Amino acid sequence: MSDTIQTTTTTELDMFAKLEKYDHEQVMICNDNRTGLKAIIAIHNTILGPGLGGTRMWSYKTEEDAVHDVLRLSRGMSYKAAISGLNLGGAKAVIIGDPKTKKSEALIRKFGRFVENLGGKYITAEDVGTTTVDMEYVSMETKHVVGLPESRGGGGDPSPVTAYGVYMGMKASAKKLWGNDSLGGKTVAVQGVGKVGMNLVKLLHNDGAKIYVSDINDDALQLCYKEFGTIVVDGNDIFDLDVDVFAPCALGAVLNTVNINRLKCAIVAGAANNQLEHEQQHGPMLADKGILYAPDFLINAGGLINVYSEYTGYHRDNAIRDTEKIYQTTLAIYKKSQDEGIHTQQAAVEMAEKRIHDILMLRATV
Ligand code: NAD
């Protein structure tokens, strides 16, 4: 048998301590010698519904790095779904290996069979290192997959919807701070003008914002300048700009001690996942500097809302309408943060946990 569900690595990785720490339900380790598939599927919480989260393919330096990533990301998905009012749990998968050299139809379809084995408890989608084409292969082995191309009845690229959600979160932040949610005439620095960043720039440009951008990809910067007349900033100088809003749309963990000390903005609102290097340290640090932080897992939830809509019968208008709710939820988080004297990320986490707990409790009776 080349399909095995291994349990042998648990001692070295201290797996159960890790699962207990963040209250994970289940981890499935998938191995297939024929295709070279080595994958981990982590299901964090299924109280609200099946765990939905993308499959990341990445050449992790160590197995422990892969485990750490999949546990952290799956927990984030639980919060993202819960705070967005979706009836979804949180899960994520990682495939270990360089997607450029290790990926094949057989490997991806084998992965699809493991997803099928979970009987719908886990729904997969594309993520870093996987594509809509890969999800088509997955769909040949299981129906528990979203993020299919539009030609296959899916929602296609979710990035414009993600950008729209970030824009909603940014407008709500402006409303909270300045009493008016217009971004016209405001200065915004966007770090990373890839799929989400570029769509965000388009929305901001339509509003008449003055936009600064940075990226390591010169072609993306050129395109952005040509289309929207954006001002290009050299690499890390983006952190020093005296702007109204800083929008991280490239990398995680950019809000660390060094960078926060450099920021001169009033609002941070962007698409990148896990922007705070250490939530409990850098959430309060931003608040102490008087910077309003729009929690990333809330305002970048448009992509998840888009694929959820695909799961329930795709219609982009529904996805956009549901994404608009990010505006009100952002304001509710700011109110909770102010009323209870806690930083905004903590307020968001508590709201997400409360919804999961409330739904669990209602099922405890009748
Ligand atoms: P992308 O790869 O299309 O774009 C990222 C851009 O950031 C690229 O243009 C890249 O060159 C640039 N970049 C990389 N390193 C940089 C650096 N040091 N400085 C400046 N620019 C840099 O990715 P995307 O889909 O636009 O996603 C952007 C972020 O939003 C990611 O963190 C992603 O996890 C998150 N996110 C995306 C979605 C979605 O729907 N695509 C949903 C939720 C969260």
Image (cartoon, grey):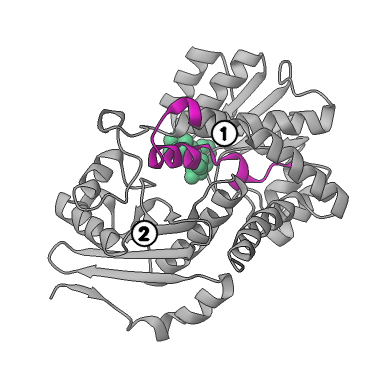
Q: Quadrant of residue 110?
A: bottom left
**Res 197 seen here:** no
The total of numbered circles placed on residues is: 2
Is 158 in front, or is 25? 25
- Magenta region: which residues? 293-318
For image coordinates 22% across by 59% down, the residue present is: 113
**308 within the magenta span:** yes
Where residue 242 appears, as percent x and y from the top left, is 76, 30
**Res 157 seen here:** yes
Q: In the structure shown, which secondary structural element does the residue marked by tag 2 occupy?
A: strand
**243 within the magenta span:** no
User: To which residue does mark 1 refer?
Assistant: 323
User: To which residue does mark 2 refer?
Assistant: 94
Q: Quadrant of the N terminus?
A: bottom left
Query: As drawn, is 289 to the left or to the right of 187?
Result: right
Q: Amino acid at mark 1?
A: Thr
Position of residue 31 relative to residue 135, above or below, is below
Position of residue 201 relative to residue 359, above or below, is above
Query: As drawn, is 333 to the left or to the right of 90?
Result: right
Q: Amino acid at mark 2?
A: Val
Is 291 in front, or is 148? 148
Query: As drawn, is 166 to the left or to the right of 146?
Result: right
Where residue 7 appears, as percent x and y from the top left, is 33, 81
Query: As drawn, is 213 to the left or to the right of 91?
Result: right
